Image: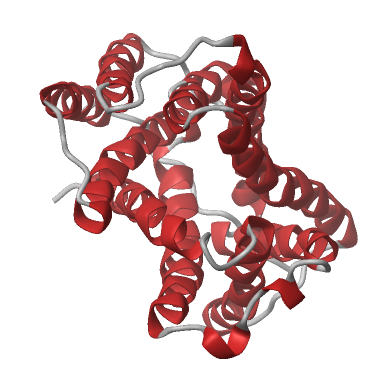
């Protein structure tokens, strides 16, 4: 079996985990302030990242110059993006936010990739990506909300579209560092800085939570977000992205809305339409077409000093 399929499976699995988290997090948002819940997710994950890094690689350090780079990446890619996503949902519809956030992200990753890494925008990537884009559009717009072009949603629409640009640049900016250090080391430090910068924004939220009244479902949501959606997912996604390439890997984000639709069915008894089923088939065909392209292997990063 070609090892590349392990990494493609990792991308699909993580995207499905993130999609399912829409259902888990939506329930948790009824109790927790969104920024506080995001901080709990990333802040509680930090010790696990450092522990895994120490066990696996024997050290956790990085040069100060690299730490400053990762501090900026964490500020933009974790703190900034997480808050922007929440406000995009607040100021526009969920369908608008999903489409404008998810659909353009891989396109920008593919277009900007040559600026950061030696990745070509091939014909197969373009064709498979187009099929996946059509599919994810059907999945999102095939739901009950549809796409709303009302001027009332313009702020949220622009914010969601901006997220896709910044998010693509965030992913790509990590790639050169992953060639020098491991994806685990890079992920550990940018998540640490992202949580650190997010902490001051939660000061007014802690007292609003009835901590003594939390049910098992709340703790389950926190554990799922920390261990599965963050620790496991970021390690697997960044490792797979480094091996497959950022341009190809980001198209697998299109699995997220498909998984979110399934989560809506399971958690909230939401219906699945024929258009969403057709969209899933189109998206799957596009991703299979992308994944069958041969790609030169990327050399393993040198051991960190």
Residue at image coords 41%, 68%: 228
Whether residue 26 appears in this view of the structure is: yes
Residue at image coords 26%, 38%: 258
Q: Quadrant of residue 98?
A: top left
Horizontal side, residue 271 vs residue 128: left or right? left
Q: Is residue 304 above or below residue 117?
A: below
Visual colour scheme: secondary structure
Whether residue 176 appears in this view of the structure is: no
Residue at image coords 67%, 30%: 166
Which residue in the rendered view is the most extreme toward the bottom?
212
Horizontal side, residue 60 vs residue 85: left or right? right
Q: Position of residue 71 (x, y in %)?
A: 81, 54
The residue closer to the viewer here, 184 or 95, is 95
Q: Is residue 217 above or below residue 225?
A: below
Horizontal side, residue 259 vs residue 81: left or right? left
The residue closer to the viewer here, 233 or 26, is 26
Give the total of numbered labels: 0
Quadrant where the C terminus sits is: bottom right
Residue at image coords 33%, 37%: 257
Q: Is residue 251 above or below residue 29?
A: above
Q: Position of residue 275 (x, y in %)?
A: 16, 21
Q: Is residue 30 above or below residue 161?
A: below
The residue closer to the viewer here, 293 or 253, is 253
Q: Position of residue 272 (x, y in %)?
A: 16, 35
Q: Position of residue 40 (x, y in %)?
A: 62, 71
């Amino acid at each position: 079996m070609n090892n590349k399929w392990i990494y493609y499976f990792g991308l699909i699995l993580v995207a499905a985990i993130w999609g399912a988290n829409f259902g888990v997090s939506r329930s948790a948002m009824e109790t927790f302030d969104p920024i506080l819940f995001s901080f709990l997710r990333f802040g509680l994950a930090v010790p696990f990242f450092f522990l895994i890094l120490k066990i696996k690689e024997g050290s956790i350090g990085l040069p100060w110059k690299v730490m400053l780079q990762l501090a900026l990446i964490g500020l933009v890619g974790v703190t900034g993006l997480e808050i922007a996503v929440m406000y995009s949902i607040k100021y526009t519809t969920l369908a608008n936010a999903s489409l404008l956030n998810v659909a353009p992200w891989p396109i920008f990753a593919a277009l900007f990739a040559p600026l950061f890494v030696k990745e070509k925008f091939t014909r197969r990537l373009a064709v498979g990506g187009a099929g996946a884009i059509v599919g994810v559009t059907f999945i999102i717009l095939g739901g009950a909300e549809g796409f709303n072009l009302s001027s009332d949603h313009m702020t949220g629409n622009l914010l969601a579209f901006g997220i896709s640009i910044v998010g693509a640049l965030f992913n790509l900016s990590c790639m050169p560092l992953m060639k020098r250090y491991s994806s685990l080391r890079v992920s550990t430090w940018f998540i640490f800085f992202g949580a650190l910068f997010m902490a001051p924004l939660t000061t007014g939220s802690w007292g609003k939570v009835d901590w003594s009244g939390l049910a098992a479902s709340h703790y389950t949501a926190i554990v799922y977000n920390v261990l599965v959606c963050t620790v496991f997912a970021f390690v697997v996604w960044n490792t797979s992205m480094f091996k497959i390439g950022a341009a190809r890997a980001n198209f697998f984000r299109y699995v997220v809305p498909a998984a979110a639709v399934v989560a809506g069915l399971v958690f909230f008894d939401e219906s699945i339409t024929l258009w969403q089923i057709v969209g899933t088939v189109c998206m799957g065909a596009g991703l299979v077409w992308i994944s069958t392209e041969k790609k030169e292997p990327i050399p393993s990063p040198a051991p960190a000093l």
